[in-house]
Amino acid sequence: MPSDELNEAYFDRGFQALEDELREVTSTLASSLPLDAESIARLPWLKESSDLEETPGEAAESAQLASLAFEILNIVEERVAWRFRAIRRAEYGPETIRGLWPGVIARMKEGGLSEDEAIAAFCKVEVEPVLTAHPTEAKRPLVREKHLAIYNRLSEWEDARMDPLREKRVRDSLRAEFESLWHTGEIFVERPTISDERRNALYYLREVFPEVVIRLNRSLEVAWEAAGWSLEKLRAAQAYPRIRFASWIGGDRDGHPFVTPEVTKNTFAEMRYQALRLQRRWTRKSAEALTESRPFVKVPIELEEGITRLTNELGEVGVSISKRNEAERWRCWLYLCREKLERSINGVAGGYDNSEDYGEDLELARWTLCEAGAKLAAKEWIEPLILLNDVFGFHLAHLDIRNNSATHDAAIAAILTTAGIAEGESFADWPEEKRVQFLMEELKSHRPLLAVNATLPAEGENVLGYLRVVADQEQKAGSDSLGQLIISMTRQVSDLLAMHLFAREAGLADYIDGMWRSRLPVSPLFETGDDLAAASGILGEYRDLMAGGTDTIQPAMVGYSDSNKDAGVFASQWGIHRAQKEMAESLASRNFEPQFFHGRGGTIGRGAGPTQWFLRALPPGCLTGPVRLTEQGEVLPRKYSHEGNAHYHLELLMAGVSEAVAMQDKRTGVPEEFHPTLDSLSAASSEAYRALLTSEDFLTFHRSATPIDALETGVFGSRPARRTGKPSLKDLRAIPWVFSWTQSRFYLPGWYGVGSGLEALQKNDPETYAKLKESFSDIAFLRYVFTNVETSLMSANLELMAAYGGLCEDEGLRERVLTTVRDEFQRTRDQVGAFLGGDFATRRPRMNKTLALREEPLKKLHLQQIQLLKDWRAADRPMEEENGKANEVFLALQLTVNAISSGLKETG
């Protein structure tokens, strides 16, 4: 690794490059916009001004300018980071880039792992990013496409520096993109639909991930060979860690009334259509590259027989394709395959029934090319098609189905009432023992509860309706497109058994070993502190009750968002850590392997953090191969907006998981002696956090001192901000909860309570406190959590907290809450700083620089938002159509929300 001096010089060069490029691009932006000099002067970094705008129109324009400037900064930061990773790779060696394949393989070798052990471990790895929508997504997908175009123009500009004519042409194109973006408008005018959100996810699945998936395997090969290991051995074992994709968009029904069975049905159809188009596009691309021709290469008889078969199947079109490619037989073969894909797209006879048949035809192309001595051609143009078919198939991504346990209780009550079961209408109130006994008896019974044509109340149809859509999809297209059945707010084992009953009634279950079992994986989602504590017991009892069957893997989802909202950041993180360890041990004792699904958001208050450190912080035994992680709306453009960035982030994920699986037996985790200590720390931090939340009128302060009402009223996502619409903290989703504290710069969910917990430990048990501090650098979990807490502290701003607090008109309440928050802020900063050691600016220069660049323009935006909140709340009829002034104020307010999100690079 480079020395500290070289590292410092490396960062200095990067920061200078960032400032130079930002200055040049901002100047180009200023010359591109159709605005007068007074308006242009509002652009950040050109002429700093703290004066607030006087009219809503001026405020809206200023916010739009700031948002545009921040997005330019974000793009420039991405480009400079990419460029300097390349420089670091060239100057210091590829293994010095943290978290990527070269460094991971080097660490594995240093840790004593053999090549054969690495191959065995890699064969177990299966990573599944799960794309979700975002109820507070502030930007239109169309704007993300504009940002990508700007990124590409900036790359072209850099390449054109030595050619004045080309440079001018690229610069003019960039200016046109800036002007177009200004006239496009960044925020939604109307609340986005599920179709809008689905279209956004499809962009990444169709346009970004395919190329990246191919590059990931090649990156592994380069690193593997550079480490001195056998590439032939890797290929022979096909020991490439597998990646799959899933989605919740169109299947997540938890508190989302707009996800109807029809929406789910349309989502399956759209995903299949786009997957087939993807396969068709790549098949044509490879066909055009395969120019191997007779008589210069001997064509195996198996390929000729295949061509004859497909030509006959496709009739006149097949004959035409064969004649046009009489000499180029592999090109002919792929064009015939492409025609079959075309027919599958159009739903006419002669197409592929499934992706397995298409895969067999691709394997024939690969094998015959190798037989003909064209192994390099097979690797370059056929193996990528096989990989894309393996990853995306004819389904693109698995669609999960999620609903809430309370909704399921209501559905069972409706089913039991319809079936004439005594006391069925009160199923939700039955004791757990009675619920389990009834459900087990039903699952062992061959007959369904409902007659074929039974009419159910809405509560029952809401659940069985979409499961029947899933069953229909399985019958028509197989199970490739189907994900997991996820139960939000899982509280007890009966919540899991109920899903098998629904599956039976919907035709999604098989009778195996004496009981009905869902054909799809049933996954609990443990979200609150209490539910996480009970999770291992619930899963153990569940597996005992469901003994038998063919399952060997048990999925379980852990929710970082609601557990944080419920108990605070440290209690959430430690509770999830302990729950995973206990669940893994409980399942292992029953010969089951866990597949943990990490429900992480885009902010630290919702489980975010650097991927490689997150993976290293997981308890040993919890990452044995398969793993799932959510990638939520706001995270997608930040990590995957273009191939270069997407490749970097997916390689971090794949390499990190592979290392964790391979080094499982060599990891120590949190020493057992510190478990009681962290239990106490968790309890004390949660007590401080809960004391704030339950203090008198705290929710009144929250509604006054944050823009939560604007977020609930605005058009930031298709899903309501509350699960049922009730005005309570419990009903408020974690995402808008975190979003509101982020916008007001409290960042409360990311740090509050940690200082009190550490201070209590220091006071009550100073010896253990000192020992924990001494061992801190060796405990990956603590380093990860405390570093994330520090990130939240450094992103928060006491001056702006006070300014937002001024929106609370109750002076006594305002001062009481602000004083409590300020005290805890200082306490947490002191305590966490004592563990991390050193100066923040020295330890984390990159974050320090990006915060400094953004702070002044952000401060003006925050103060403008505060004024707009006052004006909007003061309006008599704030959202009625005839109240034009209030609506003008609200538009400006929404634009400040968007601009602040761009500046902070996060929402909720």
Image (cartoon, rainbow, N blue to C red):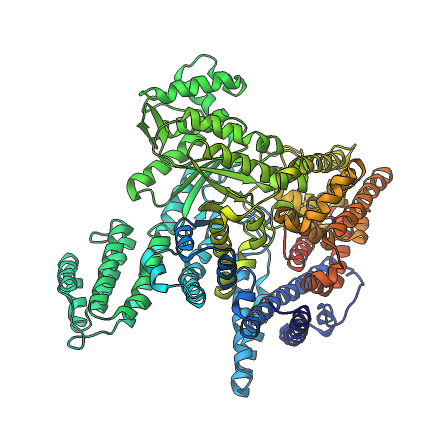
Res 550 seen here? yes
Name the foreground residue: 176 vs 551. Answer: 551
- Residue drawn where x is 55% and y is 32% of the image: 489
Q: Dividing the image into 4 quarters, which one contains the N terminus?
A: bottom right
- Number of marks: 0
Q: Position of residue 568 (x, y in %)?
A: 68, 39
Q: Is residue 779 above or below residue 694?
A: below
Q: Is residue 178 above or below residue 709?
A: below
Res 733 seen here? no
Q: Position of residue 594 (x, y in %)?
A: 46, 39
Q: Position of residue 470 (x, y in %)?
A: 37, 38
Name the foreground residue: 548 vs 630. Answer: 548
- Residue drawn where x is 23% and y is 67% of the image: 369
In this image, 786 relative to 356: left or right?
Answer: right
Rendering quarter of residue 51:
bottom right
In this image, 893 relative to 599: left or right?
Answer: right
In this image, 577 relative to 101: left or right?
Answer: right
Q: Is residue 717 above or below residue 316?
A: above
Q: Position of residue 367 (x, y in %)?
A: 23, 62
> For the view shown, which residue lies furthest in the front direction?
112
Rendering quarter of residue 762:
top right
Name the foreground residue: 422 vs 130. Answer: 130
